[in-house]
Image: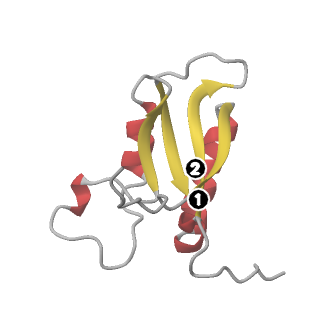
């Protein structure tokens, strides 16, 4: 079955892996998000490598904090770039019983230039 065609202006779909298990316990080790993102750092858009690419996280798998909880934001574009890497991240969350939240990045609202 083919995937539906996505319009060019469709919001980016992402999911967030929270560093909390399904029963609310904090996931250990404390640097798990940075480790996971480090493993995934080689998966990036073609031509975006550059001289210090090995020192940067992939734009598709980024560590962050959400309400003080270490988390990882995963862009679903990773699935098209490298399906096995995408499934690795999904299975990491499942295998470790981590909470997953679906999200999408929406563009910022237009700024009102009126002074008032």
Residue 27 coordinates in the image, percent (x, y): 55, 23
Number of disc labels: 2
Q: Would residue 22 be found to the left or right of residue 42 on screen?
A: right
**Disc 1 crowd, CA 10 A, few/some/many (<14, 14-19, 20+):** many
Q: Quadrant of residue 76?
A: bottom right
State how far apart marks 2 and 1 are (Cα).
5 Å
Q: Residue at x 33, y 54 (%)?
A: 115
Q: Nearer the viewer, residue 110 or 35?
A: 110
Q: Is residue 5 above or below residue 50?
A: below
Residue 109 coordinates in the image, percent (x, y): 49, 59
Under circle 2, the secondary element is helix
Direction front: furthest residue: 116
Residue 12 coordinates in the image, percent (x, y): 57, 64
Q: Which mark is residue 86?
A: 1
Q: Is residue 12 above or below residue 6?
A: above
Query: Label 2: which residue?
Result: 89
Q: Nearer the viewer, residue 75 or 50?
A: 75
């Amino acid at each position: 079955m083919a995937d539906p065609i996505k319009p060019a202006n469709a919001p980016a779909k992402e999911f967030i892996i929270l560093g909390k298990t399904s029963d609310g316990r904090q996931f250990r080790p404390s640097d798990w998000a940075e480790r996971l993102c480090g493993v995934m750092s080689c998966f990036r858009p073609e031509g975006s490598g550059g001289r210090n690419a090995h020192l940067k996280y992939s734009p598709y798998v980024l560590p962050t904090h959400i309400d003080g909880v270490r988390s990882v934001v995963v862009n679903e574009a990773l699935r098209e770039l490298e399906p096995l890497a995408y499934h690795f991240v999904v299975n990491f969350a499942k295998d470790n019983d981590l909470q997953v939240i679906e999200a999408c990045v929406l563009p910022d609202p237009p700024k009102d230039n009126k002074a008032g």
